[in-house]
Every structure is written in structure tokens, then in C-alpha cells.
Amino acid sequence: MVRVLLDDPQEERQDCLDCSKQNASVHPSRTQFDWSLIIWVNRPLPLWALQVLVAFISFFETMLLVYLSYKGNIWEQVLRVPFILEMISAVPFVITVILPSLRNLFIPVFLNCWLAKHALENMINDLHRAIQRTHSAMFNQVLILICTLVCLMFTCICGIQHLERAGNNLTLFDSLYFCVVTFSTVGFGDVTPQIWPSQLLVVIMICVALIVLPIQFEQLAFLWMERQKSGGNYSRYRAQTEKHVVLCVSCLKIDLLMDFLNEFFAHPRLQDYYVVILCPAEMDVQVRRVLHVPLWAQRVIYLQGSALKDQDLMRAKMDDAEACFILSNRFEVDRFAADHQTILRAWAVKDFAPNCPLYVQILKPENKFHVKFAGMVVDFQSLSTTLEKALLQLGKAWKNKVTCCDQGQFQSLSTTLEKALLQLGKAWKNKVTCCDQGQFQSLSTTLEKALLDSLLRCGVTFADTMVVVDKESSMIAEEDYMADAKTIVNVQTLFRLFPALSIITELTHPANMRFMQFKVKDHYSLALSKLEKKERERGSNLVFMFRLPFAAGKVFSVSMLDTLLYQSFVKDYMISITRLLLGLDSMPGSGFLCAISEVKIS
């Protein structure tokens, strides 16, 4: 661009082969023009020296990369587009050092913009690998699209400006104006190329744009549609300036959604709140139709994600939320499994955002003690039973409402109503706490009586160590981290029933190790939670390594064996060490593990 600003096609040039004194075409036509104005340019000596220096550096760097990347096929390296562009822009400058008469030869240096685009993409990828963090695919695709547009426009502008030196002698601004008008399909026609080389270049650039840009836009549209399905992210600026609550559910039904929205926004004080729905399942047609209603469209945001994943909780801005509601499906067949999932979600939210108030719905009263740290716990079964008794008494009282009520009957009716309301009040008064008197009985019911009887018969009270392995994981397609829900809740119950028992647990996902021996108000656990967030941002895969159960060898994940298999690709000694540790192999003087088989004694 510096050379173009300093160049004048009317000026007589030195060191030009067969150049006439008059260097501009006086009356150019489409087929008759002066080729010397295209082949030769006026390049000042300092600018030429600088370009030669850069060309030498680029040339030797390209040769070094080709040598280091050589894998037996030289044509694979030579026919690469970056290599061809480097040769076009660098080799002619090297030749001008040997032949000074070619110093003013035109060299398409503006093609280096494509090399800059390629280098920018590689630099961003290397930066992501260095800091162990990645931007979203949407960010990378938008960046590639912008770089492609800029490179196309810059190539067309510089090419038209240079070729029209033998025609209209356009400036850079005129070329920019022509390219914008052409690519925007406006086509005023006040600035047009006059000679056939520039017209051919315009045709080529339009064909390239028609091939490259639709591909880029298609990929961008696909990523945008996928992002719309998952809901994107809740804005950090909106989370800090507006109030919002988060609704976590395993499966969002239309009746559950409408009940929550109608009751939540019924209070005038909550009209300005936003509701962020976090659900692992994809939004169905009925829910999508409801959320498109103008009444809810601006205040309800749907995010597809799991409450057990910190990245999804960050998307919902859980740490800035005013409250979090964790609801269960009231019509769930297996209520224990539903409660296990609800408990795990409550633990995950409390671990991620300790200061966020929780409102949890539990289906079975025996599971309340697992989430007694929540600000509000609704026991659906106990509440339903209390309501049934109250409504039964109300029905008996109102059964005789058509008869004439004397003073005694009126007093009896009032007493019945008071008793019913008193039972309702007691039910709501005790909905937060767990009954300490029957805690052991509730724990026993949670663990299932058959399982507890089996543990007692096998001598769990006299055992030193228990190994828990779940052969049938409760896997959910949309929320795979819930595979360990049953195991974790049962181990937590065993930990409270038998605190002196050493329990070794196998989990499917290593991220669920944070729920082992979960304690809400433990300062060490809160500090570890903050540390894990920082380590996860740095790209660490062992964020759970400082958790006490893992450090004490009380929990392990089956994926650790997979990790050993992956590491054995570059560390061939990993398999041998593992076999030695497990006692499968032995070496002289290394010691070995032994097993004792037990037989039934009659």
C-alpha cells in the first residue's frame, strides 16, 4: 500500500526494460492498452530493500518448515497453497537482488493477506493449546468468515487498482468503492473496469466469492441452529443488572412449566424477574410454543444442560441467581431414582454456588435429610397425605352444610376447620427440617429394608472395609453424569449409618467424586470447590485430586483405567507397573499380592 501511494503511472521510471517515456495509456480501450503499466511499477530503493529483507526471512522460514514437515512426499509440501503463495511473493524479490534491472518488476505482495489469515488461524489454535482453553465453535467460525471476507475484499481492491493503472488509473478509494458496490450487488455503474485483465479479475473474484462464502455461511448457520437448540448462554451483564432465578428439572412437562410460571409471576414483586430453565432434554414442541408466547418470551430463557456440569451452571449464571428451584416429576414411577437425581442436583448447585438459596422438591420423605441444607424442602408424599386428611375432614364438615347449623354445630364446624388448618400449618412448618427421632428409620427406608437386612446379615457392623460397585448404572441419555446417582446417595446413607466403616466406591464419572461424603458447611470443601474452578479453567483433568475421599483412596473411577490405556501409547511401562501393582505379575524380590478364597462352613 505504501508503494501504491507513492507510485504515479505518469512518472518516467528507471531500471525498466523497454519502457517508453510516456507511461500511461492516453486513450485506453478494452483490448488496446499499455502492458508496461501493469508489468512495471515505481518502487523506491528503501522500500525495495525492506521488502527484500522480509522476503529473505519468509523464504528461509518456509524452506525450514518444509524440511521439518517432510514425510517422504515432496509434492505434498510443494503443492500446498501457503507454499505457493510464499514462492510467488518471496522468490521474485530474491531474484531482483541478482538482477537489479528487475527491481521495479510488479510483484503481487497483497496476496500475503491469505498467508496472514492462515497464520492467524494457526496462532489462535496454538494459543488455545498453550493456555488449555478454547473459545466456542461459533467464535472460531465467525472469525474465519470475517477473515475470508477481508481477504477477498483486499485482494480485489489491490488487484483492480493495479490493473486499472493501464485503464482508468483508479485510486485505492475508487477500487474500494467499486468492490463494495459490486459485492453488495448494488452495481451503480459509475466506476467500472475498462480493460479486459481487470474485468477478468472481477469475474474470477465473484466466482471465488460464490463458492467460498456460501460454505462459510452454511457452517455458521449450522452452528447457530445448534446453539439455539441448547439455548446459548445467559448474559453476564443481564445477570449482574437484572434479577433471575434458575429452574432445574430432569424433564420439562407443559403442566409443570405452566404451574411454575403462573405461580411465580403471580406476585407483583416478581414481575421483573427472569426465569432461566436448565434442563438436560431438548425442548419439545409444546414447551417451545408456550415460550414463544409474548407473555413469557421476554422473561423465560431455556438452556439445555445439566446441573451436574459446572460449565452449564456457569451458562445459567447460577452464582448470580437469586434462587434455584429443583423440581421433580410428580408422576415418576421410580420415585427413589427421581429423588436420587434431585439430591445430586442440589449437591452440585450447593457446591458451585454456596450462597444461592435452594428450593427442593422431594418425592419420598425418607430422602429429606440429604437436602436439609436447602432453604426450603417440600416433601411431596407427606404433604399429599396431610392434604388428603385435611380435605377429608373438610369434606365431612361441609357434608352437612345444607342443614341448619345451631351454635354447637357451628362451633364444631369451626373446630374441624381449625384442626384441618392446624395440620396444614404443621406440615408446612416442618417441611424444612428432618425428623431426628425417626432418622434411623428414615435412613433404613432410604437404603431399602431388604438391602439393609442383607448388609446386617453379612456382618457390615463388624467389617473394616466395604467396596461398593454398581453393576447397573442408572444411565440417562441426556444427563450421563446421573449414572452414579444411586451409588452416591446410597454410599452417603451408609456413611451416616456406619461412620466408622471404610467405604471404597467405584464411580462412572470422575467429576462425581466431589459428592462423596458431601458436607455443605465444611470450609475445606468450599475452599476446594473454588480451587477446582480455577484448575478447571486452566484445563486440568484432575481437579478432584485434592478431595479427601480420593486422596485417601476411598473412591475411584473406571475412567482411570482408560487413562492408563491412553498413556501407555507414549509410556509403554504403564501397563507393566499396573500389572505389578495389581499382583497379576511379579518380579523377584518385588513382593506380591495374595488372595484368600472363603468357603461356606456348615
Image (cartoon, rainbow, N blue to C red):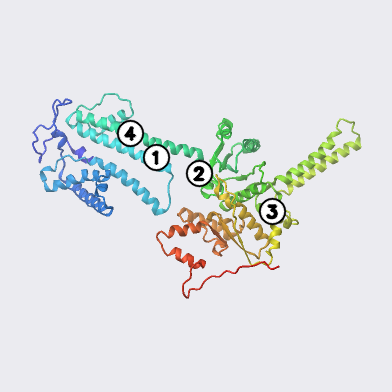
> Going 48% across and 68% down the picture, which residue do you hit?
585
Q: Nearer the viewer, residue 144 or 592?
A: 592
Mark 1 and mark 4: Cα distance apart in space: 17 Å
Does the CB distance between marks 1 and 3 fall below 8 Å?
A: no
Disc nearest the viewer among 1 and 4: 4
Secondary element under disc 4, as helix, strand or loop, is: helix
Mark 3 lies on a secondary structure that is helix
Q: Secondary structure at mark 1?
A: helix
Disc 1 marks which amino acid? Val
What distance separates the C-alpha of mark 4 from that of mark 2?
Answer: 38 Å
- Work out whether mark 1 precedes mark 3 in sequence or the reverse, and give the earlier one: 1
Q: Relative to the observer, which residue lies in front, 599 or 8?
A: 599
Q: CA distance from mark 2 to mark 1?
A: 21 Å
Labels 4, 2: front one: 4
- Looking at the picture, tell me which residue is in the foreground, 22 or 33: 33
Badge 1 is on which residue? 142
Q: Quadrant of the N terminus?
A: top left
